[in-house]
Image: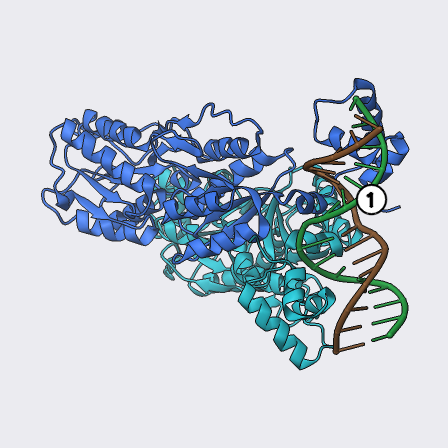
Chain colours: A blue, B cyan, C green, D brown
Amino acid sequence: MSRPTINDVARLAGVSTKTVSRVINNSPLLSVTTRAKVQAVIAETGYVPDPQARALALGRSMQVALVHDGALPGVIAEIEAGLLQGLAGSGHTLTTIRLSPSGGVDELAGFLAQHRPSGVVLDPHLARIPDLVAACDAGQVKAVMLGGEQPSPGLIASQDRIAMARLVAWLVRIGHRRIGLIAGPDHSITARERELGYLDAMADHDLDRGPSLIVAGDNGFASGAEGAALLLEVSPRPTAIIACSDEMAAGVVQAAARRGLSLPDDLSIAAFDDTPLAAQVTPSLTAMRVPWAEMAQAAAGLITERTGHNRHTVFVPNLSVRESVSERGKQAGFAAEASSSGS
Amino acid sequence: MSRPTINDVARLAGVSTKTVSRVINNSPLLSVTTRAKVQAVIAETGYVPDPQARALALGRSMQVALVHDGALPGVIAEIEAGLLQGLAGSGHTLTTIRLSPSGGVDELAGFLAQHRPSGVVLDPHLARIPDLVAACDAGQVKAVMLGGEQPSPGLIASQDRIAMARLVAWLVRIGHRRIGLIAGPDHSITARERELGYLDAMADHDLDRGPSLIVAGDNGFASGAEGAALLLEVSPRPTAIIACSDEMAAGVVQAAARRGLSLPDDLSIAAFDDTPLAAQVTPSLTAMRVPWAEMAQAAAGLITERTGHNRHTVFVPNLSVRESVSERGKQAGFAAEASSSGS
DNA sequence: TTGTAGGCGTTATCAG
DNA sequence: CTGATAACGCCTACAA
């Protein structure tokens, strides 16, 4: 026979379909005996509710949508992995949709209206986040945003600003004074916070944070290389460059190497995010690790859970020390030890 | 009012719902006038069919599932991008599911039975591909496999074996004789073909292809580094190493750099796949470019199309020349070099 | 605590 | 060519 339906189960268990339905949905008002009886039949028959039928009746499909625009594939991959793990066993399915860089709002609204997912996870680097969140609210869909400092409902926060300040402080402590920054795109919330963290810390330490030390990037590899070319021209030359993404940092490495600099002795490089890429370039990158996968997993929980338990939704990045940063001042003999090595 | 349904459209157009249904599904037997009339109403009302209801009635949901096991994230990202593009505008949605490395067959079968996607795309590096394909067939779901030499229905082929042979031939032409290989995992079809291509070409050129020149990897970064460590011990030392994935090649770079080798002068490195990673390590990797995104797009077409037009489904990789390979002088002194730079 | 009737939006069947 | 009518599998009223 084909797949059993709820009616088959009901018949076999000698109850009504609604009772079976209640068992499936963990309705609290059910006698222990009927529940057990029904569950036995379910187990026997291998019955699984049909998501399509449920979606039709409910007006809501059991899928969560990951929305991104194709930027920072490494971060997206981490998020996807985290979501997949967080969703496993919840009966939810992961659907990925890619917004065209422009006019994504209508696309998203259309998708929501048509597919009515139970939740949406927004890539932290997405432009126009506020509009997108609004679209989700309008569509009665739980939206979860990843990244951002302020803990708020529907936000899995990461303290990037504080983390960046700590990174700078650490560089200062090991002797760096001229520290350049390759920032991310303005529209990215996390990119802005990282830049603010840099400014905070440079001010705290009373260091030069003039515009010549800050160049704009778009989080991509090429813009990292271009940014490095710019920063390596300023004089006095920075002894360290922080890039706001792993890809840009990889670009800095390549640009520096092509100019004949020896890394990390002539230039220290620090990255942010710490996706697998950070450990895979040479020299491996010291990077602030943003736990994207864990954050995504938490996001999955937020969407899945019936209760709006806003438990542990603030994450704090921590430093992965690798090879790309060296001490400054004394002799650069202290080869950085790989405290945490990637896969 | 809420979203218009097919009935609203029917009423407004003064026809039956079935007629509207026929319009939506491009049924050939429809008078031009009624079709036009209905389409006008559809345009006015902004009617969009409900995928859930359609899925329930059809017993098949308009989604295609990308199945992978988490290995080679770079390749998966490319495939995902290609699918997203190929699916755009087709009304299909992309669902990603991750199989646990073991026992994935049951997982997949369960998913198919429950969600009845219109198609499944299988990651080329997945173990147990045959079982998975069988599961798809059993579930009446179109399965498309990416990679593999033999063009066959449901296969988007890539001539990896030939491409690898060409890569080797090219290395030989520019002076390399001792060429090591870091192979991929046995269970991967593409990995096997790449290894065969290497053996073909080495035999053609009558070069040493003894077991000491071939080490097994798992496509991951770490295994590339480990493989390199092994290959750099054999004597005479290889002047070039081919890694069967970008990640492994990146590992070779790191391992070589840590031993103080200068790249590409002391060692040439070639990669396979040519995901973004290949261009982002330093030195940038010369790599055989496998057009995963295009292949995935073709896969999407195969699933989407009503007709089984097996058009252009064989792809051929081509070489991206970058920095990691250098010509080898005719004054072949591998022996001298091997002894001079032994760790 | 459990059952009955009806509807969610679409498609297929089978007449006209 | 077109249109009633019955599924598809589940869920939410409303009763009992």
Chain of the residue under label 1: A
Which percent across, then down, holds residue B64?
64, 54
Taking the image as shown, residue A251 lies to the left or right of residue B8, namely left
Query: In the displayed structure, would residue B127 be above or below residue A87?
Result: below
Residue A242 visible? The answer is yes
To which quarter of the image does residue A249 belong?
top left
Number of numbered discs present? Answer: 1
Q: Camera-side residue: B286 or B12? A: B12
Taking the image as shown, residue A62 lies to the left or right of residue A274, namely right
Question: Residue visible at 37% across and 53% down?
Answer: B284
Q: Which residue is mark 1?
A: A3
Amino acid type for the residue under numbered disc 1 = Arg
Question: Residue visible at 74% across and 30% down?
Answer: A22
Question: Residue visible at 16% across and 40% down?
Answer: A238
Query: Is disc 1 placed on a helix, strand or loop?
Result: loop
Residue B121 visible? The answer is no
Query: In the displayed structure, would residue B175 be above or below residue B97?
Result: below
Which percent across, then down, holds residue A312?
45, 23
Count residues near mark 1 (Cα–Cα under 10 Å), then give few for <14, some for 14-19, many for 20+.
some
Which percent across, then down, holds residue B160?
58, 60
Q: Residue furthest bottom?
A: B32
Which percent across, then down, holds residue B66?
61, 50
Q: Camera-side residue: A92 or B186? A: A92
